[in-house]
Every structure is written in structure tokens, then in C-alpha cells.
């Protein structure tokens, strides 16, 4: 009997260091929240030790919160689970008709594949390949085929007054430069002179007014806008320019920006083509032929979505998920969201307990919990098909992406945190993976709500990460 008691006693002693360690961690994290959480703000936290397969810390882990861009974790994990790693976003040019000598007697179609990375280089490549085809004259029409998705160009719950910001583009299967104009402003050598202003991509679809001044504080704050209340594309740059400034402004509508620029550049290459364009779905038949195409790898889009928090890319992934699930060409956001809800079920949660409104987190109607995010991260970690591709796409603390300027050199979290940020007014979230001092892999989610200063809650989030990395 005494021997049995001694064995039990020594067994309990072996558990004490682990128990004490976790208690100390809980005390430190509780203390951080008590000291650093701004008055009036809320937070939910979930931390899971993936190596030891146990929960490390929880604080209101089931609290529903708006995720902002940490919503992209749901979209990307669902995409990596359901889409072929070799999948691509493809933009195609077809003709329908017959070619006699150098003349196409028929119509030219540009078929949109919702490529969020289709840029100036891609446009020039597409134009050059069309120009080098068997015809240089088109006796017919030029059409954009945008039948891949419905005509809703914004997600549910997106804010109308976030336009003309480049982070909220008008969605279309045909996108050029993410549906935005990139403005670069530089100061001239003489104070008070007009600033040097450059715009990309070049296109006659918009006009540019430069009212910006060089090193002139009386000129006011630097800004880039357009007359968006009239749905016009007259871009206005104004204010003081003391150093290099770069901003994006969206254009309306994005498919017209694509088609106008495409036709403009074909004409510059010497093609004789119609002055106007329209929109029509290509109906394939014996007179339909592929002229050329442009492809963007799936992983490239995933990397941009995660590293740079690209909203367009996340919505394009959502559309791609829907096409894959339905096997149909034309889809809506709903079909993509249904697949995300199925993914939520796979990790053991009831999707009815959450609100999923879009794929990127711009919607103010999204509501999820830290525990859901952590369980999705756990699922991804345990999947060889998902984890490697997800992990390399995440921003690295102090190194790149949206974490480039956080948890810098000298902190325990530097390079050890790979995570997705999420921020808009009143919301600041951080979720991903980190490596602790004992070599364990940790999944975590921190969701702050109802604060006016994102800076203050980022301090709290960074301190939590440093504490976990030092554990």
C-alpha cells in the first residue's frame, strides 16, 4: 500500500513542472490583457500547442467577432483543401468566324477568368499575341465575356464610402491592375513647383489632374481621389509631396477599364478593329478558335492574398472555389460561401453559429470566433496538402507582408511568428502560427474589437506573441 502511494506521489511530481509552467503562462497572459487592453475594448484569445496536442490558453475564445482580413484564412484554407495545386487563373482570347487573308470575318472574345494578378505585362502579352495572329483586321465585333460570375461588383456588407480606395475594387472576371490606377508622386527639385506624378497602367480610360505641390506645406495633406460620386474616372492628385508617395485608386467599372485598354493597345499595334466593344458570352461551335491566353498560378494568388492582404485575390479565390464545387461556368459568391461553411463543419464547428458574408473580410456582416480560427489552423497543420502552401504564404514578423514592421529584431517573436493580420475601424485581429522557445509549434488567434486605436491593441497582440515565443 505504501509503495502504491509513493508511486502516485512521484508521478504527480513529474506533472508539476508542466502544470506550473502552464499556470505561469496563463497568469502572464491574463496580466497582459488586464494591463494592455484599452478601456472599452474587447478581446478573444485561443492558443493551442500543436506539438503537444493540447490547449495552452483561452480567453473568451468563443466570443463572436468581426474578423476583418483574418477571414482570408478561411478562404485560403478552403481553397487549398479543394483546388488542385496546379490550378491557374486563365484569361483567354477567342475568335468566332473565318479568316480570309489578314481579315477576321467574325467576332473577337476576351473571356475573363477573374485573374486578380492580371497586370500591365499580362495585357501587353495578350495584345502582342493577338497582333501576331493570322489576322490584323476585324470585320465584326469585339466582346468581353464576363459570364464567369454574377454582376454584383461588391460583396455583401461592403461600405459604399470606401470607394475610391484601391482596397475595394469593383469586381469583374476581367480585371486589369486589380481594377485600380497606381499613382506615384515625387517632389520636384524646386520648392512649390508641381510635383512629378506618374500613373500606371497608361490608358485613355481615365484622366489625370495634377494639383500636387513639392515641399509646400500650405498645399495641404497629400491625397489621390476621383469624382466617384458621379461614377467618373477623373483622377485628382493634390496636396504636399515631400518624398515618394504611392497610392491606388479604383476605377469604375473594372471590366470597361480592361476592355477599353485592350482595344486601345490593339489599335496602337496597328490593328484595324471596331471602335466599340460589348459584352456577350462565347458560345463555342465549329467556328470558335482559341487565339491566346494568359495564366496566373493559384499559389501566386494565395501568396498575394496572405502576404499583402489582397481583397480582390480573396474574392477571386472564392469564385474559383465556387466554380470547382458546382462544375458550372457562371457562379455567385453564395456557392463559394457554401463550400467555406462545409469546411467549417470539417473542423467540428456548426456553420450556423457564425456569419460568413464574403471571402476577404471587408464585410461588416462577418462574425466568427478565435476558437474557429485556431481549429482551422489545426486542421491545416495536420494536412500535408495544405500546411506547406499556407505557411509559406503567411506574413513573417519583422520580415515581410503586413507584419514587416511588427515584432522587429531583438524581440523573441521576430521571425518566429507567421500570421495573418486583420484590421479595419474598431477591429484588429491576428491569427496564425508561432514557434515557442521549447521548439513547439503553436496555433493562435487574437481578435480585438471595439477599440479606436489599432496601435494600442497591436502592442497587446505583439506582447502576447512574444510571451508565447518565450514559453
Image: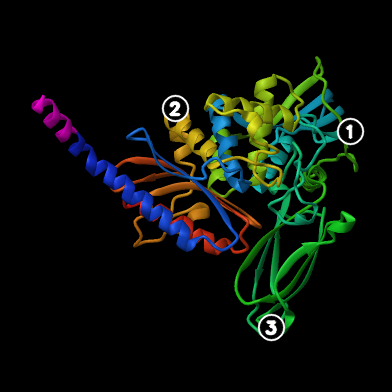
Quadrant in which the N terminus appears: top left
The one of 185 and 275 positioned closer to us in this rendering: 185
- Give the distance between the C-alpha atoms of the residues marked 2 and 3, in whole angstroms: 56 Å
What residue is shown at x 64% (from left), y 33% (from top)? 353
The one of 39 and 181 positioned closer to us in this rendering: 39
CA neighbours of label 3 inside 10 A, class few (<14), some (14 to 19), many (20+): many
The one of 109 and 212 positioned closer to us in this rendering: 212
- Give the distance between the C-alpha atoms of the residues marked 2 and 1, in whole angstroms: 49 Å
Viewer-side label of 1, 3 = 3
What residue is shown at x 81% (from left), y 38% (from top)? 152
- Local secondary structure at mark 3: loop
Viewer-side label of 2, 3 = 2
**Magenta-span inclusion, residue 311:** no
User: Disc 3 designates what residue?
Assistant: 216
Display coloring: rainbow
- Local secondary structure at mark 1: loop
Q: Earlier in the sequence, mark 2 or mark 1?
A: 1
Residue 414 seen in this snapshot: no
Magenta stretch, main secondary structure, is helix
Which residues make up the magenta segment?
A: 1-11
Tag of residue 383: 2
User: Disc 1 designates what residue?
Assistant: 141
**Residue 173 at what x, y percent from top left?**
74, 36
Left of 218 or right of it: where is 405? left
Amino acid at each position: 500500500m505504501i509503495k502504491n502511494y509513493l508511486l502516485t506521489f512521484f508521478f504527480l511530481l513529474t506533472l508539476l513542472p508542466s502544470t506550473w509552467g502552464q499556470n505561469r503562462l496563463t497568469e502572464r497572459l491574463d496580466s497582459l490583457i488586464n494591463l494592455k487592453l484599452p478601456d472599452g475594448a474587447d478581446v478573444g484569445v485561443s492558443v493551442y500547442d500543436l506539438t503537444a496536442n493540447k490547449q495552452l490558453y483561452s480567453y473568451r475564445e468563443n466570443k463572436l467577432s468581426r474578423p476583418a482580413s483574418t477571414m482570408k484564412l478561411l478562404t485560403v484554407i478552403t481553397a487549398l483543401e479543394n483546388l488542385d495545386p496546379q490550378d491557374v487563373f486563365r484569361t483567354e482570347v477567342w475568335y468566332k468566324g473565318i479568316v480570309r487573308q489578314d481579315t477576321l470575318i467574325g467576332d473577337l472574345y476576351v473571356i475573363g477568368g477573374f485573374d486578380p494578378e492580371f497586370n500591365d505585362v499580362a495585357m501587353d502579352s495578350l495584345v502582342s499575341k493577338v497582333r501576331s495572329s493570322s489576322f490584323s483586321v476585324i470585320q465584326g465585333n469585339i466582346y468581353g465575356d464576363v459570364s464567369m460570375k454574377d454582376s454584383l461588383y461588391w460583396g455583401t456588407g461592403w461600405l459604399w464610402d470606401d470607394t475610391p480606395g484601391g482596397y475595394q475594387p469593383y469586381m469583374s472576371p476581367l480585371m486589369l491592375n486589380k481594377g485600380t490606377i497606381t499613382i506615384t508622386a515625387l517632389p520636384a527639385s524646386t520648392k512649390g513647383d508641381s510635383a512629378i506624378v506618374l500613373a500606371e497602367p497608361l490608358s485613355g480610360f481615365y484622366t489625370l489632374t495634377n494639383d500636387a505641390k513639392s515641399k509646400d506645406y500650405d498645399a495641404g495633406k497629400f491625397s489621390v481621389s476621383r469624382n466617384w460620386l458621379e461614377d467618373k474616372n477623373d483622377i485628382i492628385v493634390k496636396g504636399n509631396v515631400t518624398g515618394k508617395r504611392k497610392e491606388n485608386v479604383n476605377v469604375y467599372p473594372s471590366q470597361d477599364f480592361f476592355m477599353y485598354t485592350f482595344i486601345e493597345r490593339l489599335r496602337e499595334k496597328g490593328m484595324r478593329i471596331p471602335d466599340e466593344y460589348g459584352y456577350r458570352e462565347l458560345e463555342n461551335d465549329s467556328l470558335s478558335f482559341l487565339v491566346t491566353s494568359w495564366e496566373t498560378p493559384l499559389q501566386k494568388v494565395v501568396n498575394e492574398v496572405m502576404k499583402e492582404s489582397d481583397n480582390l485575390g480573396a474574392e477571386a479565390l472564392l469564385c474559383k472555389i465556387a466554380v470547382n464545387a458546382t462544375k458550372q461556368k457562371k457562379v455567385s459568391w453564395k456557392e463559394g460561401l457554401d463550400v467555406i461553411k462545409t469546411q467549417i463543419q470539417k473542423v467540428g464547428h456548426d456553420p450556423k453559429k457564425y456569419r460568413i458574408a464574403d471571402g476577404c473580410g471587408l464585410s461588416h456582416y462577418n462574425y466568427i470566433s478565435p476558437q474557429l480560427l485556431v481549429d482551422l489552423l489545426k486542421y491545416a497543420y495536420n494536412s500535408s496538402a495544405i500546411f506547406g502552401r499556407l505557411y509559406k504564404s503567411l506574413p513573417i514578423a519583422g520580415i515581410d507582408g503586413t507584419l514587416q514592421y511588427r515584432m522587429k529584431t531583438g524581440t523573441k517573436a521576430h521571425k518566429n511568428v507567421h500570421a495573418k493580420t486583420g484590421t479595419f475601424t474598431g477591429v484588429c485581429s491576428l491569427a496564425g502560427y508561432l514557434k515557442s522557445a521549447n521548439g513547439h509549434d503553436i496555433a493562435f488567434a487574437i481578435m480585438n474589437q471595439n477599440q479606436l486605436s489599432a496601435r494600442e491593441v497591436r502592442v497587446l497582440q505583439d506582447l502576447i506573441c512574444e510571451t508565447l515565443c518565450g514559453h
